[in-house]
């Protein structure tokens, strides 16, 4: 099997004293008003006002996102100084996260031994873990098969002024984002239903997360005919992956459900090549579930969480499911197929039914489900739909705290009519192009029963065509931070 570059794992720790610390690069912050951080002020004094001179001459502006790398005119201490522009707005967790991520991306052009990050003094203590998470998240990128690494990760990253507890939380979150991004960025010949399950089983070996894999025979026995139908056209048989984290005593679990279509050709409703090239990302919902479980286990949260990943390849063959087929789902509800490229919701029909069988107190599903959501909200915002406003507000609050963009779309009863079928209970697409993200959610609502439920359509932000200073193109790991925060807020 093709082997990708290993997941980066720099040595990470906190640093209690910075005076006299020798390192390759010292990272400091500067506001747009020219306010020097404490450490940068110390550097300025040691260099006879050199930094103030650069600021007054307009060589360093402190604009948000500006990164200025300087060689220090000193015989000891840091060799290089990286000045991070903080802008003029009040700091928030998102800017802390992005500042951390930009550091690694800026310094990754050559080998660095030790990097000391002194940004903790620029942000409130409550944001310190976000700096660390950003640094770790920035360590991975999509060029995982280039023979020469596109990003060279420092050997050691030391955080000055950040308590060990914050470092450890940030590390858990950052590493979890990397796990999600790596699963999504792998080619479909490497990550398919069986290998996805194998990789996740290996990831959680020896941890508090218990893994159960339903193979094709188990799916048949369990009546998961919807998952089996979508996967019927592929030589790679489907799977259902169940992850259990039990650290909350007798409380009912929270459920996270992810769409895991490891490659989506569109089936008989075949996509054009341009629409198919990135369809390895169609399992980003399932990968996000894995990342969140990884994070909460690393953090040792006192809660019960179950993660469900419905895994299938949507391919073309004589065995492919067809337009006009009627599928009896695990719940007994029947689906008429009007478009084989609306397959993710079909996979989720069975996966959600397995989830509610475990009697969760609340449930969130994630899916790269509809292009319609991207038309409505663009590529940076996830759509959010719900049957329970209290739960929706909780997820919204967690996303707002983390700086991830979500927007609630309505679930008016009138949309129920759009997914009714003339020959089965429901059909797998609505009427024409209109309200496609909502009709997809209305389809899913048929399979959640009375469980409080939020659907997150992450088709836009899960995979990026172009890079930003704070992240590479490719998988973004969107909603890992927010859902870890949500679970943490529900913990004992």
Image (cartoon, helix red, strand yellow):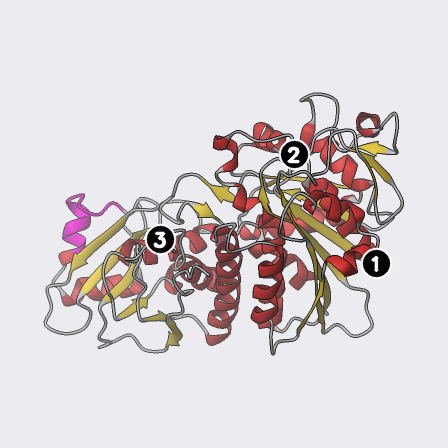
State the SS at label 3.
helix
Per the rendering, the mark at residue 341 is: 2
First in sequence: mark 1 vs mark 2? 1
Residue 236 position (above or below residue 209): above
In reply to whether residue 287 is colored magenta, the answer given is no
Q: Nearer the viewer, residue 24 or 6?
A: 6
- Give how far across and how far down residue 229 sits, in percent: 74, 44
Q: Residue furthest front?
A: 318
Q: What residue is pinned by disc 1?
A: 221
Name the residue located 38 percent from the left edge and 43 percent from the top edge. Answer: 467
The CA span between labels 1 and 2 is 26 Å
Residue 36 can be seen, yes or no:
no
State the SS at label 2.
loop
Q: Nearer the viewer, residue 20 or 417?
A: 417
State the SS at label 1.
helix
In reply to whether residue 59 is colored magenta, the answer given is yes
The CA span between labels 3 and 1 is 49 Å
Mark 1 Cα-neighbour bin, 10 Å: few <14, some 14–19, many ≥20: few
Q: Which of label 2 and label 3 is nearer to you? A: 2
Q: Which of label 3 and label 1 is nearer to you? A: 1
The CA span between labels 2 and 3 is 37 Å
Q: What residue is pinned by disc 3?
A: 102
- Give how far across and how far down residue 140 sits, in percent: 41, 58
The answer to the question of whether label 3 and label 1 lie on touching residues, with beta carbons closer than 8 A, is no
- Give how far across and how far down residue 274 sits, in percent: 48, 31
Mark 3 Cα-neighbour bin, 10 Å: few <14, some 14–19, many ≥20: many
**Residue span colored magenta:** 51-61
First in sequence: mark 3 vs mark 1? 3
């Amino acid at each position: 099997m093709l082997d990708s570059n290993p997941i980066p794992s720099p040595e990470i720790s906190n640093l209690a004293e910075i005076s006299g610390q020798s390192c390759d690069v010292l990272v400091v912050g500067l506001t747009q008003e020219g306010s020097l951080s404490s450490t940068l002020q110390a550097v300025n004094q040691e260099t006879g006002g050199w930094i103030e001179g650069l600021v007054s001459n307009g060589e360093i502006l402190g604009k948000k996102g500006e990164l200025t790398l300087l060689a220090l005119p000193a015989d000891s201490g840091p060799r290089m100084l990286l000045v991070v522009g903080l802008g003029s707005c009040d700091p928030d967790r998102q800017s802390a996260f992005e500042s951390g991520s930009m550091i690694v991306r800026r310094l990754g052009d050559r080998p660095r031994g030790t990097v000391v990050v002194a940004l903790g003094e620029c942000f409130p203590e409550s944001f310190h873990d976000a700096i660390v998470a950003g640094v770790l998240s920035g360590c991975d990128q999509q060029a995982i098969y280039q023979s020469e690494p596109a990003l060279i990760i420092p050997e050691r990253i030391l955080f000055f002024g950040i308590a060990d507890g914050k470092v450890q939380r940030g590390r858990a979150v950052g590493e979890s984002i990397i796990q999600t991004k790596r699963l999504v960025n792998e080619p479909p010949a490497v990550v398919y239903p069986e290998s996805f399950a194998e990789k996740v089983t290996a990831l959680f070996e020896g941890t508090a997360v218990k893994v159960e894999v339903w193979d094709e025979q188990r799916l048949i026995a369990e009546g998961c005919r919807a998952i089996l139908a979508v996967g019927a056209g592929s030589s790679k048989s489907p799977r259902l992956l169940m992850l259990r984290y039990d650290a909350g005593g007798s409380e009912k679990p929270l459920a996270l459900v992810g769409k895991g279509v490891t490659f989506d050709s569109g089936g008989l409703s075949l996509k054009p090549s341009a629409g198919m090239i990135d369809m390895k990302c169609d399992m980003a919902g399932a990968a996000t579930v894995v990342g969140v479980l990884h994070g909460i286990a690393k953090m040792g949260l006192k809660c019960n969480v179950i993660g469900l990943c419905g895994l299938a390849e949507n391919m073309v063959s004589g065995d492919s499911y067809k337009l006009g087929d009627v599928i009896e789902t695990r719940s007994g509800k029947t689906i008429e197929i009007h478009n084989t490229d609306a397959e993710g919701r079909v996979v989720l029909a069975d996966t959600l039914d397995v989830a509610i069988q475990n009697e969760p107190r609340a449930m969130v599903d994630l899916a790269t489900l509809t292009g319609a959501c991207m038309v409505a909200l663009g590529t940076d915002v996830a759509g959010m739909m719900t049957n329970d406003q209290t739960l929706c507000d909780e997820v919204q609050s967690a996303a707002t705290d983390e700086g991830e963009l979500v927007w609630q779309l309505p679930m008016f009863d009138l949309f129920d009519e759009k997914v009714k079928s003339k020959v089965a209970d429901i059909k797998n697409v609505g009427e024409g192009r209109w309200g496609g993200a909502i009709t997809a959610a209305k389809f899913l609502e048929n399979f959640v029963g009375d469980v409080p439920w939020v659907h997150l359509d992450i088709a836009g932000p899960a995979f990026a065509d172009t890079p930003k200073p704070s992240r590479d193109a490719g998988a973004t790991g969107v909603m890992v931070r927010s859902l870890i925060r949500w679970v943490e807020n529900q913990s004992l």
